[in-house]
Image (spheres, grey):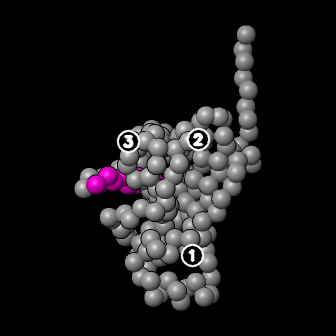
Amino acid sequence: MNYKKTIGKIEEYGEKKTRKLSDLKDNFKDKKELREILEKRNPVIYETFTKSFSPINLTLTVVNPGDFHGEFYLTKGHVHKKKTPEFYVLLEGSGNLFIQKGIIIKTIEMKKGEIALIPQGYAHRIINTGKNKLKVLSIYHENSMPDYNVKFKRRFFR
């Protein structure tokens, strides 16, 4: 028996969230210039599309290319309140995965098709270092409880 079932594209069926520059204002260094830019425009930095297959969630994160005064576009980043692992798979583009826990910080260059494990208890974010959209699939438990109130210890510049 040859069984194949597809669910379609996650962008079409997932819960969509959009993060704009104003949502990430605390993540960039140049606060004065940021306020001036936000008076004129508020560009989309990234979007997420989440599909639940209880108890596992899949999220496609699409980070636009670009920078704000030399700092690469990136995700807000988070740590899981419940100590659950998360897996990232680079689908398209080029970028880095940044993880930190206490004094341990690490930047991992993502490679297409490779699976990166975010260890339990590590804060993490992705950074688009390329000229095209960065597309990353994440796989995690639905009860991971992300906490976005993380102070990351490193910035990423061109």
Ranked by sequence position, the earlier of labels 2 and 3 is: 3
Is residue 93 visible in this depiction of the protein? Answer: no
Task: State which quadrant residue 55 falls in.
Answer: top right
Amino acid at circle 3: Pro
Residue 9 numbered tag: none
Q: Residue at x 36, y 52 (%)?
A: 99
Q: Which residue is mark 2?
A: 142
Determine the secondary structure under disc 1.
helix
Position of the N terminus, as image quadrant, is: top right
Amino acid at circle 1: Ser
Q: Which residues are magenta?
A: 92-102
Considering every residue shown, the one lying at the far left of the view is 103
Q: In the rendered view, does 33 fall on the left or right side of 137?
A: left
Q: Which residue is mark 3?
A: 119
Determine the secondary structure under disc 2.
loop
Residue 67 placement (x, y as % from top left): 47, 72
Considering every residue shown, the one lying at the far top of the view is 1
Amino acid at circle 2: Glu
Q: Residue at x 47, y 44 (%)?
A: 82
